[in-house]
Image (spheres, rainbow, N blue to C red):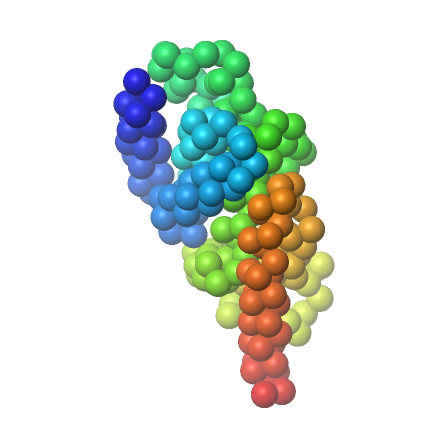
């Protein structure tokens, strides 16, 4: 029964995300699922809840992208997930937990993770935004919105998201370099340590190269 629910959910998510930009597409979802399960085993979280929430966490991403950030994909995704799961033979308590995981997974979101499973999914999603993978995704997103390669010469706090100034470097300066400080699980923080150091070194290197310091 649970395997069938997961398979149906995977099909639903793939269909919903068929038109999502690569930086937040199905590849991202698969990595978050793998990371979430890895952390969940260490943290003794419910593996079914974690896997379902990780699969569904970005199902409203296309709506946020189309709105240029006006729609919160976490909040909207939780609503879609609750409706989708209502006839799947899952208890109301499980549905509420899965929906909460989705609603609370956003870094800049107002809803904070309260359950162990929500903390696991939050950390897994954040871990995929840092390190080598995080750097790659930041450049993918910058290309998707038509941003420049680098804009370290401008005042970052005056730049705008979803604009030509929304570069990978801007994402690092306003978000990625702080991610490790906000992780909620012991295992998540352990994984983040090495990824953070690699990312920090990379962005210093690209800055030095662009400014002809190296």
Q: Is 89 in front, or is 57?
A: 89
Does residue 138 appear in the picture of this structure?
no
Q: Residue at x 43, y 52 (%)?
A: 23
Q: In the rendered view, does 32 fall on the left or right side of 157?
A: left
Q: Residue 212, how many percent across, how many down?
A: 59, 87
| Residue 214 image-quadrant placement | bottom right
Number of numbered discs: 0
| Residue 164 image-quadrant placement | bottom right
Q: Is 206 in front, or is 62?
A: 206
Q: Is 16 in front, or is 65?
A: 16
Image quarter of the N terminus? top left
| Residue 26 image-quadrant placement | top left
149, above or below 27, in the image: below
Does residue 55 appear in the picture of this structure?
yes
Q: Residue at x 56, y 82 (%)?
A: 209
Q: Residue 80, how many percent across, how many down?
A: 45, 24
Q: Residue at x 38, y 51 (%)?
A: 22
34, above or below 166, in the image: above
Q: Residue 100, how many percent across, how many down?
A: 56, 25
């Amino acid at each position: 029964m649970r395997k069938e629910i997961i398979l149906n959910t995977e099909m639903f998510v793939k269909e919903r995300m068929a038109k999502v930009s690569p930086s937040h597409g199905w590849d991202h979802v698969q990595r978050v699922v793998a990371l979430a399960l890895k952390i969940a085993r260490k943290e003794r979280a419910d593996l079914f809840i974690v896997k379902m929430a990780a699969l569904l966490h970005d199902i409203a991403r296309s709506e946020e992208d189309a709105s240029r950030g006006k729609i919160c994909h976490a909040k909207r995704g939780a609503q879609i997930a609750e409706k989708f799961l209502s006839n799947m033979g899952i208890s109301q308590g499980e549905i509420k937990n899965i929906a909460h995981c989705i609603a609370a997974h956003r870094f800049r979101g107002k809803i904070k993770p309260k359950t162990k499973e929500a903390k696991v999914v939050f950390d897994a999603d954040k871990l995929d935004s840092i390190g080598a993978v995080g750097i790659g995704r930041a450049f993918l997103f910058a290309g998707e919105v038509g941003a420049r390669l680098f804009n370290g010469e401008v005042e970052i706090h005056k730049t705008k998201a979803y604009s030509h100034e929304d570069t990978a470097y801007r994402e690092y300066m306003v978000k990625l370099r702080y991610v490790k400080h906000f992780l909620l699980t012991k295992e998540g923080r352990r994984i983040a340590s090495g990824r953070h150091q690699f990312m920090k070194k990379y962005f210093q290197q690209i800055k030095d190269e662009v400014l002809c310091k190296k």
